[in-house]
Image (cartoon, grey):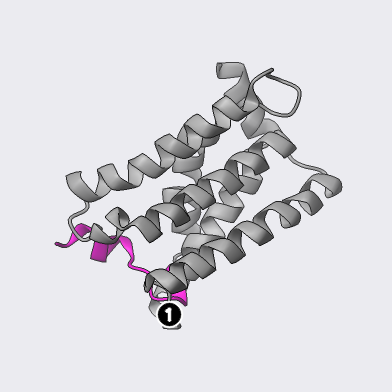
Amino acid sequence: MLSRLKSSLLTWPGRHGWASCVLIAGPAAVFIAIVALTGGFLHWQPESSKLWRLPMILVIPAFSEELVFRGLVPKQGESRHPWLWIAASIISFTAWHAVEAVTYLPGAQLFLQPAFLICAATLGLGCAVLRYRTGSLWPAVAFHGLVVWLWQGLLGGPGIAELLRG
């Protein structure tokens, strides 16, 4: 297991790997946007004070959550049952957001709404497939970070300060 985690951190996708990431992340991002718009928690609200947060977002939540939830997902050819690993990562990632809302993020009641949980599951699926297809954790970190950064900086999503306040 530790070798799989280490490999996910030390593998960098080649040009073909990054190109396949666009084909995976693009449709996932579109689906997330549609669900978020219909769920009422996505609206154009650029906030320049949040746009500088990209480096922080790439660490928390993107890197930390991807390490925990996708670090053990096998790469292509490494397991006879990769979809079980992918399903487990999606379920645990989605459930984690609900746990956050009922434990230590009092301002995260949005995380309990079905539309948000569908978006979280879709993000989890996209990130898990990126990890599986490329063998690397880095495309998943980039996709996760970009989604959160756009949501917080341009599309009205709450930052950590808002989530910590009740």
User: Residue 138 location in percent, x, y?
Assistant: 63, 44
Q: Which residues are magenta?
A: 152-166
Residue 130 falls in image quadrant: top right
User: Residue 34 location in percent, x, y?
Assistant: 52, 69
- Between 30 and 108, the one lying in front of the other is 30
So how many labels did they put on this image? 1
Residue 64 falls in image quadrant: top left
Q: Does residue 90 appear in the picture of this structure?
A: yes
The residue wearing badge 1 is: 43
User: Residue 125 location in percent, x, y?
Assistant: 56, 44
Q: Amino acid at mark 1?
A: His
User: Residue 87 location in percent, x, y?
Assistant: 52, 33
The furthest residue to the left: 166
- Between 67 and 77, the one lying in front of the other is 77
- Between 117 and 75, the one lying in front of the other is 117
Residue 72, compared with residue 59, is above or below; it is: above
Residue 3, compared with residue 36, is above or below; it is: above
Q: Is residue 36 left or right of residue 128?
A: left
Query: What residue is shown at x 26% (from left), y 42% (from top)?
Result: 99
